Image (cartoon, rainbow, N blue to C red):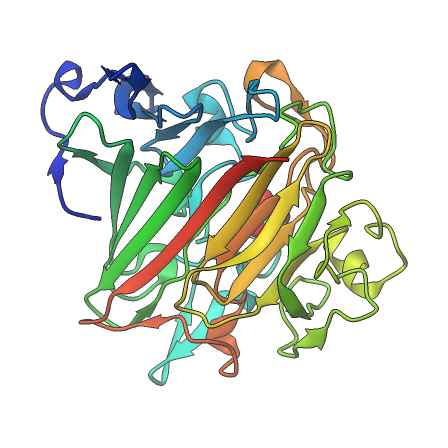
């Protein structure tokens, strides 16, 4: 699926492709536009993927960020279902990781410290005493290189970032490629491929905030969520896993059958208190390395349904607890408490300090891979 990509070094007008009609059917397309300029003058481009089946995805090469995702409801009415900003300044100044690829390490590493092959490393600390989402200037705050499809009918774009040795304290140079593809089955597919020139750790994820109603005045508390997991990795008050694996049975964490997110979010529960709601890693059923359905999110009012498929061992479900109305998003809307949620497919938080968790070590000669698919349908 990586075949057929060419470096996007030609003039903008050349690599814009319009949706074209074949036998009366609208085909998929990819269009490039200028999104804005960074404070240092570099241009940020936006790639609009259309699948010809009612969905569009917009992605910018700053942070490899999804800026919009429009999805039909049960009556065919299309709405944008992800949080974002209208302008590049929002993404440059924002602190909520809206829509971005986060890394090198998605989620937290305790005190930003770990050992690898007997050597001690100190990462940037940016969340109390801990390291979160790659540090002060993570993958969400850098300009990626775009590699465009060579065929006008491919609704995909590949973004590439080379993270230098020592960046945010991480050892080794890492090259990460993230390919977004909008399929004609209303799926947004995200394929990751990473390599390193020295032993290091790599655990990137996608940090889109979803609200399937498309109306960001609503919370996500009435969305129904299913997570195919029998257990979570409980955390301490700094949201660092204790190292244990705890059953979801008879707890507010039991999403094995669809449950309204608001049903138990305010229960008296130590884990919910630490997270100020849901902000935990679920230990997904099924074999890591194999793409399987791990979660389903449903909004009854619009009929929109999103299934999440991944080959990752864990899913961080974050219920937007830190949104507090101070982030002003697209169309001037203030994003209030729990107006959207993240479903972040990844390895478990703090794995470098928890040898019992599935490894995140990447060595020269190995290739990190992740495939995650957000599949949309209606009911
Ligand atoms: C984390 C939250 C954090 C949020 C930042 C989530 O992935 O789990 O704890 O506050 O990202 O926006």
Would residue 272 be found to the left or right of residue 379 on screen? right
Quadrant of the rendered image containing residue 77: top right
207 lies above or below 253: above
Question: How many numbered marks are there?
Answer: 0
Q: Can you give x and y, in whole percent of width and height, for residue 332 in the image? A: 61, 15
**Could you tell me which residue is drawn at 22 percent across and 37 percent down?**
145
Looking at the rendering, in which quadrant would you find the C terminus? top right
Residue closer to the observer: 284 or 195: 284
350 lies above or below 68: below
Quadrant of the rendered image containing residue 378: top right
Would residue 298 be found to the left or right of residue 88 on screen? right
Residue closer to the observer: 109 or 21: 21
Q: Can you give x and y, in whole percent of width and height, for residue 196 in the image? A: 23, 64
Q: Residue furthest front?
A: 23
Would residue 191 be found to the left or right of residue 308 on screen? left
Does residue 41 appear anywhere in the picture? Answer: no
Q: Can you give x and y, in whole percent of width and height, for residue 3 in the image? A: 14, 46
Q: Can you give x and y, in whole percent of width and height, for residue 254 in the image? A: 75, 62
**Could you tell me which residue is drawn at 78 percent across and 71 percent down?**
249
Residue closer to the observer: 359 or 50: 50
Does residue 351 appear anywhere in the picture? Answer: yes
């Amino acid at each position: 699926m990586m075949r057929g990509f060419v470096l996007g070094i030609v003039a903008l007008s050349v690599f814009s492709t319009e949706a074209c009609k074949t036998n009366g059917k609208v085909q998929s397309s990819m269009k490039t536009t200028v999104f804005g300029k960074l404070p240092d003058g570099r241009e940020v481009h936006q790639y609009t993927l259309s699948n010809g089946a009612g969905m569009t995805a917009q992605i910018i090469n700053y942070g490899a960020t999804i800026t919009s995702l429009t999805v039909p409801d049960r009556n065919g009415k299309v709405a944008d279902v992800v949080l974002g900003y209208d302008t590049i300044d929002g993404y440059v100044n924002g602190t909520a990781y809206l829509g971005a690829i986060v890394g090198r390490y998605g989620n937290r590493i305790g005190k930003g410290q770990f050992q690898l092959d007997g050597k001690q490393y100190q990462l940037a600390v940016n969340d109390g005493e801990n390291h979160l989402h790659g540090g002060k200037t993570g993958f969400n705050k850098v300009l990626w290189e775009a590699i465009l499809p060579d065929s006008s009918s491919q609704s995909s774009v590949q973004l590439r970032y080379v993270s230098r040795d020592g960046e945010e304290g991480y050892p080794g140079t890492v090259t990460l490629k993230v390919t977004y593809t909008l399929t004609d089955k209303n799926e947004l597919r995200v394929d990751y491929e990473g390599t390193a020139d020295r032993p290091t750790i790599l655990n990137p994820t996608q940090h889109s905030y979803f609200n399937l109603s498309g109306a960001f005045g609503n919370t996500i508390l009435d969305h129904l969520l299913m997570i195919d997991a029998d257990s979570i990795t409980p955390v301490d008050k700094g949201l660092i896993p204790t190292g244990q694996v705890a059953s979801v049975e008879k707890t507010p964490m039991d999403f094995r059958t669809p449950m309204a997110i608001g049903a138990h979010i305010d229960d008296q529960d130590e884990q919910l208190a630490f997270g100020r709601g849901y902000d935990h890693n679920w230990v997904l059923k099924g074999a890591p390395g194999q793409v399987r359905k791990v979660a389903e999110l449903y909004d009854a009012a619009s009929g929109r349904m999103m299934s999440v498929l991944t080959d990752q061992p864990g899913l961080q479900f974050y219920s937007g607890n830190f949104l507090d109305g101070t982030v002003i998003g697209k169309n001037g809307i203030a994003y209030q408490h729990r107006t959207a949620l993240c479903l972040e497919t990844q390895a478990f938080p703090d794995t470098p300090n928890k040898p019992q968790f599935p490894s995140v070590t990447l060595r020269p000669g190995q290739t990190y891979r992740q495939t995650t698919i957000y599949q949309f349908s209606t009911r």
